[in-house]
Amino acid sequence: MRELGRRLAKLLRAGDLVMLSGELGAGKTTMTRGLGEGLGVRGAVTSPTFVIARVHPSLGDGPPLVHVDAYRLAGGLDEMEDLDLDVSLPESVIVVEWGEGKVEELTEDRLQIAIHRAVGTAPAGDGTEPAETDEVRHVVLTGLGERWADAPLETLTG
């Protein structure tokens, strides 16, 4: 997930909204950590669950990363107004975990990433012992709006 985040960072630019969905432990924060590395931002990217949002300024000439965890927010965009995401969006890359139904009104152009984690066991390669598959992820990237119409998203997970 971290490496996928690093690769995705090469496609991102100021004004991009990325929405991450997936169950707890799916890898949303790990992917965002990779995004931060790829964007070259300051500070350790950790889950902002209790502070809701963290801003990571760029160490170079790239955009800052605004990392939001909307898990504890019950309302829609109205409840998130205090975060001023609409003000930050033009000059930042904003990544929102658990943002479905809460931030779509910010922009028609957004990248939605659904992360599905396989849990359980699968047959081992030699058929003798089952292998743990809780590290397997299936990622679906959906670009919405003109910004993502021609983006090479298929090359990221292939």
Image (tube, rainbow, N blue to C red):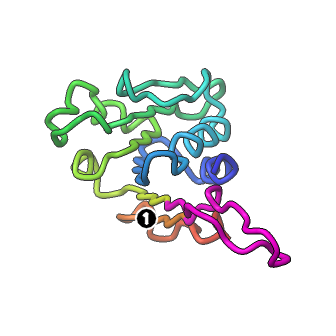
For residue 48, above or below residue 117? above
Q: Tell me where the magenta segment starts and ends, as one range.
A: 116-138
Q: Secondary structure at mark 1?
A: strand
Q: Is residue 128 magenta?
A: yes
Between 90 and 136, the one nearer to me in the picture:
136
Determine the residue located farthest toward the front in the rendered image. 128
> Which residue is tagged 1?
143
73 on left or right of 141 = left
Q: x and y percent of residue 129 in the render?
A: 78, 69
The residue drawn where x is 57% and y is 29% is: 45
Q: Which quadrant of the rendered structure holds the C terminus?
A: bottom right
Between 76 and 120, the one nearer to me in the picture:
120
Q: x and y percent of residue 29 in the render?
A: 53, 40
The residue drawn where x is 59% and y is 68% is: 152
The residue drawn where x is 48% and y is 31% is: 47
38 on left or right of 81 = right
For residue 9, above or below residue 118? above
Between 128 and 91, the one nearer to me in the picture:
128
